[in-house]
């Protein structure tokens, strides 16, 4: 006869909400990252992902200028912007423009432009932003931190789609109790 087939229809959200759907297996990808889309679930999770970059350039652009591809965002006044080396290839989308924010020097700064390899943030309301400052896309664990669920919602995409868009060129650093225990970078493969 045929070997026993393992059935699974429950991903992370269904695993938390519908125990009768567990069958023989469950698929808990998001839960492994500490992501909980079910606010009433009886589980205490800690986010396991922190995604950061650094400011590559800071400049002031005049009112009327368009920022990013496809003229998606026009400046209504002189605006101080920060350019970061994270774009469509790294998880941000054109849908984040005008909707999403990233954390710069503990301030939420609007995403005003995206390109394939870069994005632009309005840092006018954030004093002292300089080249090399850390930018947090996902993480920080504080109340004003930015979660993967929130970043996906701003673009109207699922958390799985958002995380799946982060290309392998983004280095991964694995930590346990604040100690680096491993890393992976596409640059290591060549």
Image: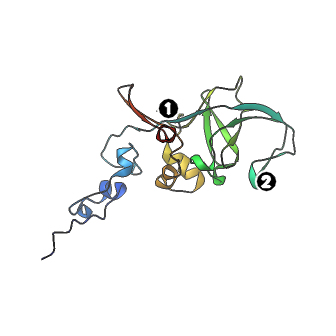
- Looking at the rendered image, the quarter that the N terminus falls into is bottom left
In this figure, which residue is indicated by the disc labeled 1? Answer: 140
The local crowd at label 1, few if under 14, some if 14 to 19, many if 20 or more residues have their Cα within 10 Å, is some
128 in relation to 93, above or below: above
Q: Residue at x 31, y 53 (%)?
A: 16
The image shows residue 187 at horizontal and vertical percentages of 52, 38
Q: Residue at x 82, y 44 (%)?
A: 75
In this figure, which residue is indicated by the disc labeled 2? Answer: 71
**Local secondary structure at mark 1:** loop
The image shows residue 184 at horizontal and vertical percentages of 44, 38
Q: Nearer the viewer, residue 129 or 37?
A: 129
Which of the marked residues, 1 or 2, is nearer the chain's N terminus? 2
Q: Residue at x 64, y 50 (%)?
A: 96
Q: Quadrant of residue 12?
A: bottom left
Residue at the extreme bottom of the image, as rendered: 1
Q: State the scheme by which the image is colored.
A: rainbow
Q: Residue at x 50, y 55 (%)?
A: 161
Q: Quadrant of residue 105?
A: top right
Left or right of 12 in this view: 98: right
**Local secondary structure at mark 2:** helix
């Amino acid at each position: 006869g045929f070997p026993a087939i393992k059935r699974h229809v429950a991903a992370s959200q269904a695993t938390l909400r519908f125990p009768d759907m567990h069958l023989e297996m469950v698929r808990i990808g998001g839960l492994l990252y500490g992501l909980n889309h079910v606010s009433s679930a009886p589980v205490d999770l800690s986010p396991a992902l922190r995604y950061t970059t650094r400011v590559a350039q800071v400049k002031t652009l005049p009112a009327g200028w368009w920022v990013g591809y496809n003229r998606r965002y026009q400046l209504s006044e002189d605006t101080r912007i920060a350019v970061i080396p994270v774009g469509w290839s790294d998880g941000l989308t054109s849908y984040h423009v005008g909707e999403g924010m990233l954390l710069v020097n503990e301030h939420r700064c609007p995403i005003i432009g995206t390109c394939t390899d870069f994005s632009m943030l309005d840092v006018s309301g954030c004093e002292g932003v300089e080249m090399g400052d850390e930018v947090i896309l996902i993480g920080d664990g504080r109340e004003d931190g930015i979660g993967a669920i929130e970043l996906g919602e701003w673009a109207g995409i699922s958390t799985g789609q958002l995380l799946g868009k982060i290309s392998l060129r983004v280095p991964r650093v694995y930590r346990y109790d604040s100690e680096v225990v491993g890393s992976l970078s596409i640059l290591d493969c060549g």
